[in-house]
Image (cartoon, rainbow, N blue to C red):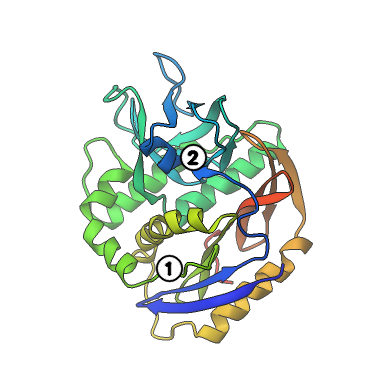
């Protein structure tokens, strides 16, 4: 994959490489969080009784709308996280697969869901993605292991010593928000970038590519907050990754990604997913109308 490396930045144990791919801004769409803010979309429980692992999204606009894997939706009967990235066609009603990240609540606090300031941490996303890929290959749909997701939320709560009355991942973020913002303020976005690789120590934690530069800009601080939640749990090492190492690892991965076997599946909304796994990474590409909408690669807990 042709790539233009734009910048390398480092702060504490975290290092990021921002980059650009040639197929930028080739498809017109807006983000789900923006659509929620502008009342262009309604995200609701599937019915009055609700379903833990499904939500209904009404696209009320003439625009394509994108929600990212790991997006946290808060409100209604309990907070949820998206199981995969989703592209919604204009003026459609779509059921989307989600997992619960608030085990101790099943009571309505609002009619609709709102968006949050952060993406779920990498380990939660990676294990969820791994299970979704397995279930898709078994023709079970975009289903996660709900117990595993709850276990991850409990682990983050314990790591940060946060007591949550409803076992909510949002409570962990809100309690330690100032620590996570420290990472956000020490990294600057490059306006020409639409991709990022994030390293903790010398390990590639996650890599993301978005079709649009403006969507990348919206998700940039959210990704850093989610990564910060993960980075705080990983012991910092004296020897940090160098700029040369980080760029080499990123470029090598992108060069090899087309050689990794991929399994094709229909997207939740429109488009198709190509899901892949190696010994170290799990992830997928979401494509529509010959354009890459989103690519994510997530570390499965091994150095690479």
Q: Write the residue at 75% across / 43% down.
A: 264
Residue that carries the numbered disc 2 in the rendered image: 82
For the view shown, which residue lies furthest in the front direction? Answer: 62
Considering the numbered disc 1 on the image, is that residue within a helix, a strand or a loop?
loop
Task: Name the residue that disc number 1 marks.
Answer: 189
Q: Name the foreground residue: 297 vs 217.
A: 217
Give the class, few, some or many, for how many residues have Cα within 10 Å of label 2's Cα (few <14, many ≥20).
many
Q: Residue at x 47, y 46 (%)?
A: 70
> How far across and how far down the image is residue 265, in percent?
72, 39
Q: Is the C terminus in the top left, top right, bottom left or bottom right quadrant? A: bottom right
Q: Earlier in the sequence, mark 1 or mark 2?
A: 2
Q: Which mark is residue 242?
A: none
Up the image or down, 57 lies above or below 72; here it is: above
* x, y percent for residue 43: 43, 28
Q: Residue furthest top?
A: 48
Q: Residues within 10 Å of mark 1 (few under 14, many from 20)?
A: some
Which numbered disc, 1 or 2, marks the residue closer to the eye?
A: 1
The quarter of the rendered structure image containing the N terminus is bottom right
Q: SS class of the residue under badge 2? A: strand
Contact (Cβ within 8 Å) of mark 1 with mark 2: no
Classify 206 as above or below 48.
below
Residue at 29%, 62% in the rendered image? 180
Tell me: 87 left or right of 258: left
Instruction: Decide: is 197 above or below 39.
Output: below
> Residue 86 lies in what quarter of the image?
top right
**For residue 131, which quarter of the picture?**
top right
Residue 223: x and y in percent read 43, 58
Between the residue at mark 1 and the residue at mark 2, the CA separation in whole angstroms equals: 25 Å
Percent coordinates x, y for residue 65 in the rendering: 53, 38
Identify the residue at horizontal 52%, vertical 38% (top origin).
145
Q: Is residue 126 left or right of residue 227?
A: right
Q: Would you identify the image quadrant in which residue 164 lies?
A: top left
């Amino acid at each position: 994959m042709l790539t233009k490396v734009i910048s390398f930045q480092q702060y504490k144990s975290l290092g990021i490489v921002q980059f650009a791919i040639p197929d930028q801004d080739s498809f017109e769409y807006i983000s789900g969080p923006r659509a929620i803010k502008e009342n262009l979309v309604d995200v609701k429980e599937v019915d009055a009784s609700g379903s833990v692992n499904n939500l209904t999204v009404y696209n009320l606009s003439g625009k394509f709308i994108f929600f990212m894997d790991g997006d946290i939706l808060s409100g209604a009967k309990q907070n949820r996280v998206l199981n995969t990235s989703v592209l919604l066609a204009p003026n459609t009603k779509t059921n989307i697969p989600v997992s619960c990240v608030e085990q101790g609540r099943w009571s309505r606090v609002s009619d609709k869901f709102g968006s949050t300031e952060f993406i779920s941490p990498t380990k939660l996303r990676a294990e969820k993605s791994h299970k979704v890929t397995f279930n898709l290959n078994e023709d079970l749909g975009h289903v996660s292991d709900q117990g595993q997701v709850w276990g991850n939320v409990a682990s983050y709560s314990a790591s940060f010593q946060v007591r949550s009355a409803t076992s909510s991942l949002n409570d962990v973020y809100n309690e330690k928000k100032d620590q996570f913002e420290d990472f956000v303020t020490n990294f600057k976005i490059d306006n020409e970038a639409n991709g990022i690789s994030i390293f903790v120590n010398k390990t590639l934690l996650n890599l993301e590519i978005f079709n649009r530069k403006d969507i990348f800009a919206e998700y940039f601080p959210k990704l850093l907050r989610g990564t910060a939640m993960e980075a705080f749990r990983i012991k910092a090492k004296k020897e940090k990754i160098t700029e040369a190492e980080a760029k080499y690892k990123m470029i090598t991965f992108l060069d090899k990604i087309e050689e990794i076997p991929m399994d094709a599946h229909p997207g939740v909304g429109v488009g198709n997913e190509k899901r892949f796994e190696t010994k170290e990474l799990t992830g997928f590409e979401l494509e529509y109308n010959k354009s890459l909408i989103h690519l994510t690669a997530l570390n499965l807990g091994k150095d690479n």
